[in-house]
Image (cartoon, coloured by chain):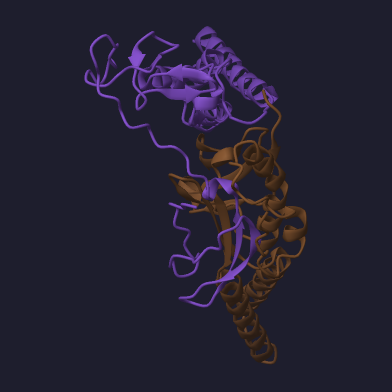
Chain colours: A purple, B brown
Amino acid sequence: MVRNTIVRCSACDHALALPETVGGGTLTCSHCQKPTRLWLFPALYQNKKSAAAQVVLEEGHSSCMNHPTKRAVSVCDGCGKFLCALCDIDWNGEHLCSACIEHRGSDEQNDELRTEYVHYDRVVLGFALLTLVFSIFGFGFIFAPIALFIGWRNWNAPWRPVPYRKWGMIIYMLLAFLALCGWGLFLTFFFINL
Amino acid sequence: MIQMSRLPGRSVKGFGWSSQRHQLWLSPEYLLYREISGYREVVKRYYYGDIQAIISGPTKSWRNCTLCTSIMLVVFLALFALSAPADVSYPAMVLIIAGFVLSLIILIINLVLGPTCKTVLYTATSEAPLYSLGRKRNAEQAIALMLPFVEAAQRGEAPAATPEPPSTSEVVADPTAWTAPTED
């Protein structure tokens, strides 16, 4: 079996001499003699097929959009481009090109390709707190509308990749709203008295 | 939203504004690793079929922390013993007692949490340290929880020539020696 992955000792970073079978156990590093717990899985020993040897385009065959000299083996389910074996990406049973994968990754509704999240509820909380803090200096009213706008604008955006509740955002927006109302009342009375 | 459960273990790296929290979550299809910094987070998904190996080796952090806090305890105790009969100011005494109590708390917490380890997950393209599994107890519990998912995912992909993996529940429960290969 071919094993291409080098597993290193966690203490000395030396390559470990792995057994030729899957399973779990303790292995002693031959370099530093430290014991390391290991769990090996069948994927380590799989001989996954690399991209098939590319067939050079022959007359009468369609070519890949990205590699004009290579034969197309599939069609992108996203945009319809012809794809060779290298360009063909299997995603959940669909054949997609790299551009379509990237486009789906930027789609807010496609959670499985998303890698970055912004905790908008915390952003709103931050601005609500800034409102309260800077009210001491007289210009806290600037931040409350920003907090409310951010909360409203990103209400349906995914904030986290794991299950979460929106009650926190509701409370923080309410805090900002109350702060804004307080400022509104203060300014109203201020100008009336003037 | 798909069902997800959080695995044992947590880690905080750095201080203050630049601190980063690490969490590991289990979903039906992949392992989710979260790196949270302030109001932003970056996630990495490790699909069970791609996981090739997980290693966990002991580190010296636990021993060093125990040693340091024990020394501090002894020092503060000695200071207290020396300052008690002497005419030491009240603030100084408070500081000595506070130092003693703080060292004791850190020592107890460190002993309760248990030995530290470094856990790394291997796929074909990456070698990912799992900082949230920095304690041996948490690492073993988390790996025991994710093993059935990894096995189930890879059983369907494993080629016929690969030997049948041993019962991992037995191995995880008592992995004192390497499991001998069985040939069909």
Q: Nearer the viewer, residue B147 or B64?
A: B147
Image position of A191 (left or right of A179): left
Q: Nearer the viewer, residue B26 or A88?
A: A88
Position in image of residue A37 (x %, y %)? 61, 64
Q: How many numbered markers are drawn?
A: 0
Q: Nearer the viewer, residue A155 or B168?
A: B168
Residue extending farthest to the front is B184
Q: Nearer the viewer, residue B126 or B3?
A: B126
Residue in the picture at 73% in, 58% down: B172
Position in image of residue B7 (x %, y %)? 68, 45
Image position of B121 (left or right of A60): right
Residue in the picture at 52% in, 78% down: A33
Image position of A13 (left or right of B110): left
Is A194 drawn above or below residue B115 in the view shown?
above
Is A96 drawn above or below residue B120 in the view shown?
above
Residue in the picture at 35% in, 11% down: A81
Residue B47 showing in the rendered view: no
Is A161 drawn above or below residue B105 in the view shown?
above
Position in image of residue B101 (x %, y %)? 69, 72
Position in image of residue A70 (x %, y %)? 26, 21
Residue A104 showing in the rendered view: yes
